[in-house]
Amino acid sequence: MRAALEVFAELGFEAASTTEIARRAGVTQPLVHYHFENKERLWEAAVAETFSHLTALGDAAGAELEGLDGLPKLKAMVRRFVLFSAAHPEVARFLSREGRGDGARLRWLVSQHAGPLSATVSQLIRDASAAGLFKPIDPVALSCLLISAATHVFTVPALVRLEHGCDVRDPAVIARYADTLIEVFFHGVISEGQRGQP
């Protein structure tokens, strides 16, 4: 599934071939067709597998975060999503490619998987605002900003390495990135002494 997602992310559905997916997975092409029938079924299986990992991430977080509430819980959830994004950069690449144009595949992906997950994130933001944890802010905009910030840097490791001299695959760099993202999103970048200044 990971090999399929990588190939679909890199080449797009039309240009991707089951031959290339089989090669990357280290299996024969007939085996791919035996299990998935055709490229469309393989694409759907790869999407379902991807979103099952995201759902499992939320379920694991639910068990791990038992007893936490408010900002500590939200921060821990953001950290887990950053770690997932660092470990699976192909997911953001895939969604970015699929999201470029409207079509039957994208509509299926949104109705079956991405839409419900996005609605959950937006509801968490609304709940945090209602509880007075967040400013009254557009939950869609905040959700998009947070997801972009948590994923993009891991999709362009060569660019970050050349621009900033760091490897976004290094666990220490990933941890610092998660810390920084949480600090910016939950506390802002303005120092206490500068708050209220023009």
Image (cartoon, rainbow, N blue to C red):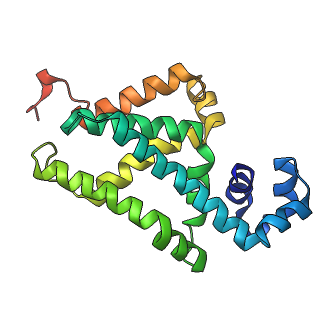
Quadrant in which the N terminus appears: bottom right
Quadrant in which the C terminus appears: top left
In the foreground, 152 or 34: 34
In the foreground, 129 or 165: 129
| Residue for point 23% across, 34% down | 68
Question: How many numbered marks, from 0 up?
Answer: 0
**In the displayed structure, does residue 161 sit left or right of residue 198?**
right
Give x and y (percent) for residue 197. Answer: 10, 31
Q: Is residue 107 visible?
A: yes
| Residue 140 higher or lower than 107, as above or below | above
Give x and y (percent) for residue 90. Answer: 63, 48
Give x and y (percent) for residue 151. Answer: 50, 44
**In the displayed structure, does residue 190 sit left or right of residue 110?**
left
Give x and y (percent) for residue 175. Answer: 46, 24
Which residue, as the protein is rendered here, is positioned at the far bottom? Answer: 104
Question: In which image quadrant can residue 134 be found?
Answer: top left
| Residue for point 12% across, 21% down | 193
| Residue for point 42% across, 49% down | 147
| Residue for point 50% across, 27% down | 174
**In the displayed structure, does residue 62 sit left or right of residue 110?**
left
Q: Is residue 137 visible?
A: no
